[in-house]
Image: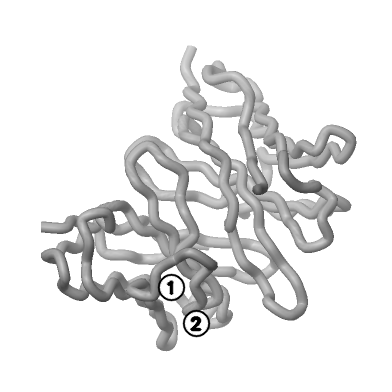
Amino acid sequence: QSALTQPRSVSGSPGQSVTISCTGTSNDVGGYNYVSWYQQHPGKAPKLLIFGVNKRPSGVPDRFSASKSGNTASLTFSGLQADDEAEYFCCSYAGSYTWVFGGGTNLTVL
Amino acid sequence: QLQLQESGPGLVKPSETLSLTCTVSGGSISSGSSYWAWVRQPPGKGLEWIGSLYYTGPAFYNPALKSRVSMSVDTSKNQFSLNLMSVTAADTAVFYCAKLHYDTLTGYIPFDYWGQGILVTVSS
């Protein structure tokens, strides 16, 4: 069970669109529709942003969207805001009641 | 509103057992659709799933940690616990307890509630 692969960092200006990728294998991301995404501000607990590949929990703005193609999932920000600056983690079900996280991506709003 | 709170020692000696408890409030640990989990985050690094369990068991563990981990539930106290044996400095991390939701209609909603985290340092 290896960690999912995410870019170490991405950046964008306010109002821009940015996408973070999350690459796994057919044993996790590609094999199940259970990819989730989390936002973590420094010193805080992670917060669920997306579950089930592209579903948003109540209260999460629709400018956060997500998708999956093959073994790669993506999280897209439409209209970056200053408060979006944080660490983002993907997570996938990996079979046999196990879960695997990505290494995290640091988003900088320029 | 469901709340989770980790508790336990902040300092553990190498080779000893790290023991943490998560207290659930605002809801029942015996909820039919809730699973309970531990996730850790070494300083400056990413998240690592440690294990999950249902209140009636069994527990499922990260294969990389399986030989050293055990989890349990105490329904009378609305708590669940983590034991990590034979710790080394590499086990120094913020440990989070979290909830997973599962039902047959929605499927899994993983880690929808989190505790605030507790830093555990392994050092002599």
Q: Secondary structure at mark 1?
A: loop
Q: Position of residue B19 (x, y in %)?
A: 67, 27
Q: Position of residue B115 (x, y in %)?
A: 57, 40
Q: Amino acid at mark 2?
A: Gly
Residue at 52% x, 30% y: name it: B118
Q: Secondary structure at mark 2?
A: loop
Q: Quadrant of residue A94?
A: bottom right
Q: Position of residue B47 (x, y in %)?
A: 45, 49
Look at the picture and state if A53 lies above or below A99. below
Q: Position of residue B75 (x, y in %)?
A: 86, 40
Residue at 68% x, 43% y: name it: B67
Residue at 51% x, 76% y: name it: A55
Considering the image in quadrants, where does the C terminus of chain A appear? bottom left
User: Real-space Cα distance between discs 2 and 1?
Assistant: 7 Å
Q: Amino acid at mark 1?
A: Gly
Q: Is residue A68 left or right of residue A100?
A: left
Q: Does the CB distance between marks 2 and 1 fall below 8 Å? A: yes
Q: Residues within 10 Å of mark 1 (few under 14, many from 20)?
A: many
Number of numbered callouts drawn: 2
Q: Residues within 10 Å of mark 2 (few under 14, many from 20)?
A: many
Residue B65 appears in view: no
Q: Which residue is mark 2?
A: A30
Q: Which residue is mark 1?
A: A24
Q: Chain of mark 1?
A: A
Residue at 59% x, 51% y: name it: B113
Q: Is residue A22 left or right of residue A27?
A: left
Q: Nearer the viewer, residue B121 or B1?
A: B1
Residue A81 appears in view: yes
Same chain for marks 2 and 1? yes
Sequence-wise, which precedes: disc 2 or disc 1? 1
Q: Chain of mark 2?
A: A
